[in-house]
Image (cartoon, rainbow, N blue to C red):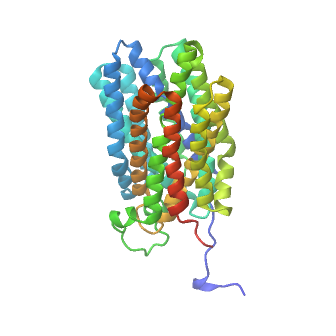
Amino acid sequence: MQKTGPQATPQVQGPSRRSRRGLDWFTFFVADIQTGFGPFLSVYLTTQKWTQADIGIILSLGSVAGLLGQIPGGWMVDSVKSKRRAAALAVLGIGLSALLMGASPLFLSVAAGKLLHVGASSVLGPAIAAITLGLVGYAAIGPRLGRNARFASLGNGIAAAVMGACGYFISPQAVFYVTAALAIPTIWAVLTIRDEEINPLTAGSGFSRPDAPAPISIADVALKPPIVVLTMSVMLFHAGNAAMLPLVGSAMAMQSSQWATVLVAICIIVPQLLVAAISPKVGELAQSWGRKPLLLIGFGVLPVRGVLLAYTREPSAIVAVQMLDGISASVLGVLVPLTIADATRGTGRFNLVQGIVGSAVGIGAAASTFAAGRLADSLGVAATFLCLAAIAGCGVLLLLLAMPETRPQV
């Protein structure tokens, strides 16, 4: 018999089509505006007669600031009431940073722009995840994260092509004006997401009910076994992964400097196409298979990729091996925030833990590029790939032995 009266369970309605489409376009345009701050920055500064030492200082400054900003950025997103407003302000900050860099290539203005970009990005990443979780809820978060990854990868690829064309046909400086202009449709996209459809309890703190207690301590959340294992595994993954593509570029440059840039570009674009194709399916499988099997697949292909790259020299074979990077990117892009959502449910620390894991990414990536350069000089490129594969294998082993399944039991 159907319940009636005040005790009846209200029907939960999903987000409107407008909000779902708004989130699609928001993730697409965010990828667009972030693309302009990648390799294009180094190209632009080089054309402005900067020395490689000064460029290195700016990049290092950004890396350190990004590492330090991850946890405060996540904490701030947990604290603010409107995640949508926080995201819009972060996009505005990124647009202003691009305008500042493009208008004045002086050291102080570029450094200020870089710091503004890093600070805004530290807020924007957790804000996207918070809006997503608050909009669709825990039951639909897996497939929705997969859809986010698809639109982000499409935005990344298209933006790289458009900005590369702008840099070639106009000037490297034009890339930053295009990036600043793209902040306008990005803000428009996030504002089309209806604020009233974003559950503030779910989006802000991971609470699943209005009468939940205050957020538990940071230490209690950070020391939860799934969070500890995931954080360490992610750090080991990026310690093995971050230097692989630069090593591919160096190896190709030694064989043919004319084709090295083209090959690296293809090695970036091909995995992005794979991410766009399979990410939604990854989100669906996370609901039926569980989180751990997919995490093992995503992490497990990295050591295989490292071993294959150690013995691969043909350009076409290298591109084929790099497709494995698309599998890893698809799985990590969906499963890492999804597992964090599982493990922090009801704790009030969803976005803060994203910051903790983001810091682990930064530490692993920095260690990877630092160590790989020295290993390549002393042991050679092939041996370095094998060392990176071994480091990544440690992350897989840690997941296999210590990671619990976090999928909620329905």
Q: Note whether 39 is above or below 290 in the view shown.
A: above
| Residue 210 % position (x, y) | 45, 72
Q: Note whether 352 is above or below 324 in the view shown.
A: below
Q: Nearer the viewer, residue 13 or 129?
A: 129
| Residue 10 % position (x, y) | 61, 75
Question: Residue reaching furthest front?
Answer: 379
Q: Nearer the viewer, residue 204 or 395?
A: 395
| Residue 341 % position (x, y) | 50, 61
Relative to 41, 285 lies left or right? right
Q: Nearer the viewer, residue 125 or 239?
A: 239
Going 44% across and 54% down the picture, which residue do you hit? 231
Question: Residue reaching furthest right?
Answer: 1
Relative to 145, 109 lies left or right? left
> Is residue 15 visible to us here?
no
Please state, as top left, top right, bottom left or bottom right, where the C terminus lies in the image: bottom right
> Is residue 184 visible to us here?
yes
Quadrant in which residue 221 is drawn = bottom left
Please state, as top left, top right, bottom left or bottom right, where the N terminus lies in the image: bottom right
